[in-house]
Structures are given as structure tokens and as C-alpha cells.
Image: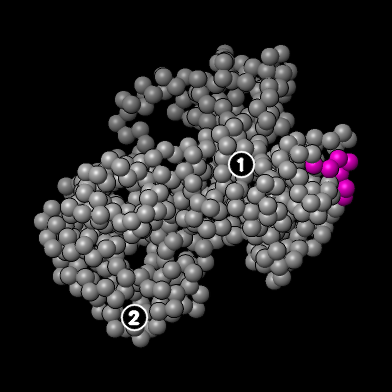
Amino acid sequence: MARHLFGGSAADVAEDITGARVPNASGTVWDGPGSGAIQLIDLTDLGGSPIQGLTSDSQGMIGQFYGPDGVDTLWVDFGSGRVILTPTDVAEWLDEHETADDPHGIKGWAEAMFSGGGQTMTVEKLLQDQVFYAAHRGSGLEAPEHTMEAYEYAVASGATAIEVSVQATADGTLVCMHDTDMTRVFGVAGSVNTYAYSAARNTLKPNPSDLLGAGWGPQKLTPLRNVLDRFLGKVVIFLEPKTNDASAILTGGWLMNNYPSCASSVVWKTYYNNATKQWAQDKGMKTWAYIDATTAAADMDTYDANVDYWGVPHTSTDAKVAEVVARGKPVIVWEVARRSDRDRFAGLGVRGMMTPSIHYIKPVTQIIPRDNWKSQVKAPGDIGLENYDGKFALKYDGTGIAYFDFMDRASCLMGAVSIPTFPANGYRVSFDMKYDVVPASTLHAGIAFGKVADDKYRFSEINTSGGYHVAIRGGGDIQVYSHNTTVPNGTVLAQGTASKAPVAGQWMSFQVDLTPTQIILRRTDLTPVFQIASNDTTYRGGYVHLSGGSVVDPTQKPKWRNFSITAL
């Protein structure tokens, strides 16, 4: 191992959490960004003499120094939060790295995994995990559903299984799409089986911008052949014909003639009473049969012999899920978009999670510390009230502003920036908010925070994971509420009248600190700063939501910018 060189480049500056330079300041060095990080003191100057910390110069620049032995990433705190610092000797490091025989220490694993003719993932291997994940529609809440872009995204995010829905064009070409009516995804009415493939490929453009943000452009319609050629054997594919004509083509020879060894890594997915399950089992494939939340046990008994895995919708009750699990066959739930549902179903003995949020559902840490709304691309874990309905999704204007178009108690989980595990000293939520048209004096919008789980938040409804919300009213009153977990109405914990009511088109700036002992709300665009506080300690969760509150008129919708969550 060796010490890496840090500092000295134009990018190495002392910054606070807003990105502003901090000149002539003393900094501490840490091995991570979170509350459990360890302060690093084993630092040296260029001559090898020990130094205890860092000091920025008059321009806020960080001079050159050597980090601890073998450490390739540091976090530096100059008094306003930790910022990442990377080595400046990367070229030398890469030369050494690339010439090493086994730089990552995984050579043995890789040889075992990738030997065997490219068949690197099978259904048998997938089922070895106590809980496994499959990307629903190619992780359709994070990338454009059932497109090659989505499948590539899911696999790059670590998915070991993907779900592929299939339909047929008028001339019999199999293509990947879910809805039999194309209106939602393609913006035109009708079915793809009325188009020749050449016309469909060149005129039907899946456009995910309403759901995923305008930063996503139109995609190409994806042929099934391309997906199988690219991914068969690399991931498990849950394959479902959505129409009778597609089913007839697949079972009539197309699949087995073109991919005769597919059975080891393809699961045949159908509705529980579909007759093609027998065909699939005869070809050596495993079958996944999905039911409705109300399907009777007697109906499942009728088809059980041709079912290897049962599929249960996420809308099912705990009792229903437990009933299906008790049948003794692996159960896969769809679609599991939130970590709270993941944990709920895992606790009930579910083996598989069909998720449209593959990148968000598996980590348990903050993904990004501040919004990326300027990109106009929805971040993983930023989830509206309905998974695949763009009407409920957060919108972006391209300048870093986010808002809702649909204002019936609108809300959006900010899962990407939330800190799931409450930091030792708490966290701060910072944001700007404005009304272009100020609502009536009693109407409000704001944020919900402190939730211990990432379940849906909606004003005036029961919130089973509790938490708090901030109400910023049209008349200038600002309040902090707590949520009882059994009743829809909140309880006022702190309130006050700001010295200035919202002004149409004018930004207001807020900080919400949730510490182990207090809730502190500040409006920082005012002089003096407006502040209210509460000593309530009931909820100390890390999940945060944007909330349209009681505003229902879209012309009065709140807008947000500069949203971030940082550990204190």
C-alpha cells in the first residue's frame, strides 16, 4: 500500500455545504461523510512530516499533502459540513492498478462466475439468495420502461433479474411493451399489433418525460430479440407475453428454436389461470403465476401443479401474503417501489421483489445530498403517489425548480436525498419555496420529515410511520405539526407569524433541523431570521417528502429549489 497525494489542484478548495469557498480556515479530515466516520490524523506534508489537519489559504485553496496509507478518498470539514476530496496522483495510481495481477482481490470469484460458456446467471442461482430482486419493466420508475435503456440501466445498477413484457406487431415481430393500449407510453391510441414492425420501430417513440422528467428524450421501441441476445444468461429474464398473438409466436417455436438453452435462465410469467404454463414446464422452464389481491385459495389450488413460484400484488393484505407464502412455494411480490414495502414483505417470508426502483430499493444510505432537478431527470427514490402515473410525478422546469401539476394533497418522497438512518447529531433540511400566485391565507404547502419509513405521505390522511410536517400558509403563518399514527389530523407543536407573508413570485428560504432533542424551523430570508422550535422527540426518522399540503388550485402551486439534506 502507499500514501496518496491530495490537494494542490484547481479543484481542491475548502467549501461549505453551499459550495462557497472558506479562506484561512482549519479543517478536519474524515474517512466518510456520515455520523459513524472516523477522524483521520495520520497525514503528512510533502516531506513526510506529520500534520494534524488542514488549513486553507487566503483563496480557500487546499495545499498538497499525503493521506493515510492506502486511503484513496477523504472527506474534509471546514466547519460547515464534509466535502469529498480525491487523490491528485490518479495517473500513477492507475498505472500501478492496471498492471496488478488481481487489483480488486476478486480474481477467483470472477473465474468461477464467468466460466461455463457465458451462462453466468441462472434461475437456480437467483433462488439461492434469501431475498432476490428483479427489475420490474426494467426498473420503470428510474428508466424508460421496457426499453433497452431501462434494461441496461437495471443491470448496471446490479439487477440479477429483469422482467420483460412482450407484444407482437402486425407482421409478427416481438417487441417489449406492457400496455396493450399505447396511449400512456407512446402518446397514441391503439395497439401495436396494428403496425408493421418497420412503421412501429420508426414512428412509435416511448416518451418517459411525464413520469421521469423532460431530461429523458424519446426512446426506440425495443425488439425482444435484441434483449435476449444482449442479456440471456447474464441475468434471469421473467418473460411475459401480454397478448394472445405474442403468446402464440413464443410458444409456437420462436423461443425454443432461437434460444434452445433458455430454460435455465428464463422464468415464464403469466396470469395464474393461463394455460401456457404447462407448455413452459414441458420445455424445462420455471413458471411464475401471479394472482389478484382477492384470488381465492380454491382457484389457486386448481392451477398449483403448473406453478413454480406464486406472484402476489403489493396491494394485498398481510394476511393474503402470509396465506400464499404458507403454500410452500417461493412468492414474488410486484411492484415493490419503496423500502418500507420491501421490509414488510421480507418479514412475511416473501422471497422475491419485483421492483421498479432497483437502484433505490437495495441501498440503505443517502444516494445524493442535494437535488439534481436542473438535470430534469427524476432521481432514484423520488417517488410520487402513484408509481407509473405521470400525473402524480414531480415536474422540473430546467432551471433547478421542481413543482407538481396535480394538486390534490400532492406529495413526493425525496428518497434519493433522505438519510434513512438518523445521524447521531440529527440532520438539516434546507430549501427555498415560493408561490407564483399566493393561495388563501389558511392554505399551506411545505415538507414532511422525520418519517421512520418511506411510505406515502399525504396531508389529512393517516401516516402509519408518523413524522412531522411544516405548513407554510398563504397568510404568513408557519407551523410545525406532528402526526399521530392512527388519525388523519396532525397536532401543532410550534407556530408563529412570520414578519413577512409570502409574496407572489418571491422566494422564501427555510432550514429545518431535526436534532436528537429538538425540531427547529427557520425562515432565513428574513431579517431577523424567523425561528420556532419544539422539544418533541417522538419521531427521528430520516425520510422527507415535498408536500403540496392543502393547496388544490394548480395556479397556486408551490415551487421548490435548492433542496438538500445534510447530517449535523
Question: Looking at the picture, does residue 343 appear above or below residue 551?
Answer: below
Q: Secondary structure at mark 2?
A: helix
The answer to whether residue 361 of the structure is visible from this angle is no
* Label 1 residue SS: strand
Residue at (21, 70) in percent of width and height:
276
Tell me where the magenta segment starts and ends, as one range.
Answer: 496-502
Q: Which residue is mark 1?
A: 402
Tell whether position 498 is magenta: yes
Q: Which residue is mark 2?
A: 300
**Residue at 67 percent of width and 42 percent of height:** 559
**Front-most of residues 423 and 388:** 388
Q: Nearer the viewer, mark 2 or mark 1?
A: 1
Residue for point 29% across, 62% down:
242
What is the quadrant of residue 563 in the picture? top right
Can you say which quadrant of the picture contains the C terminus?
top right
Say left or right for 170 vs 482.
left
Left or right relative to 484: residue 378: left
The image quadrant of residue 494 is bottom right
Give percent across and percent down for residue 362.
47, 52
Image quadrant occupied by the N terminus: top left
Question: What amino acid is labelled 1 in the image?
Answer: Ala
